[in-house]
Image (tube, rainbow, N blue to C red):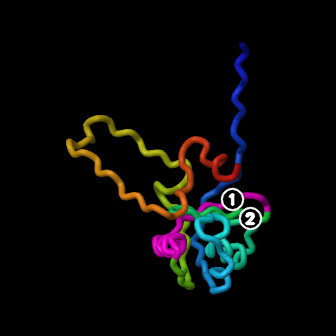
Amino acid sequence: MTKSKLKRPVDYAVKDATRDLILTIKERDVEGSKRKKNDACAAAHALCRQEKFKEARVYKTTTYVKKADGTWVRYITPKDLYMEIMIFDRGGKMDVGDFRLHAPKGSMRMGHHVKPTGKARKTARLPNSPHIVANVRDNAPKGRNHLAALFG
């Protein structure tokens, strides 16, 4: 029996944004959007219309946009846009307006790793279970091959 070599995942040119972006969502963006679709929501339509991006994918916490040269740029989705997305995905009406997509800073940047602190930093408290919001689009995948899961 021969072992097959694992292929290296496809390299995607993904960079962090260097400056914030003001996104203006208009009524026509909301009318042509689909619920629970990260690439066909009102924010994705507005990004493609306003900034002439080839493609946009809007997740709960992260937004990816594809430039004309094929590179992807990563922004942090603001909380107010996330709330509008959640309302829209659950069947409500999305409000139009301006939203500021933030450039990742500090520990939010790609490639930043927190140093392990060891056992001395743990407390005796049990961890709280997170509240999971249902009937909303998924988070952007995380982990080793997250870019292959996003764009593959």
Secondary element type, mark 2: loop
- Residue 51 visible somewhere in the drawing: yes
- In the rendered structure, the answer to whether residue 112 lies left or right of residue 131 reads right
Q: Position of residue 74 (x, y in %)?
A: 61, 61
Residue 25: image location, x then y, percent: 61, 81
Q: Are marks 1 and 2 in contact (CB under 8 Å)?
A: yes
Look at 56% across and 62% down and name the residue there. Answer: 59
Using a 10 Å C-alpha cutoff, classify the residue at mark 1 as few (fewer than 14 neighbours), some (14 to 19) or many (20 or more): many
On screen, 24 above or below 143? below
Residue 122, relative to residue 61: is it above or below? above
| First in sequence: mark 1 vs mark 2 | 2
Magenta segment range? Answer: 69-91
Image coordinates for residue 58, horizontal then vertical, percent: 60, 65
How crowded is the residue under tag 2: few (<14 C-alpha within 10 Å), some, or many (20+)? some
Residue indicated by mark 1: 72
Residue for point 74% across, 64% down: 67
Residue in the picture at 41% in, 41% down: 115
The stretch drawn in magenta includes residue 70? yes
For disc 2, the marked residue is 67
Spatial separation of the CA atoms under disc 1 and disc 2: 6 Å
Query: Considering only vertical position in the picture, is 21 above or below 138?
Result: below
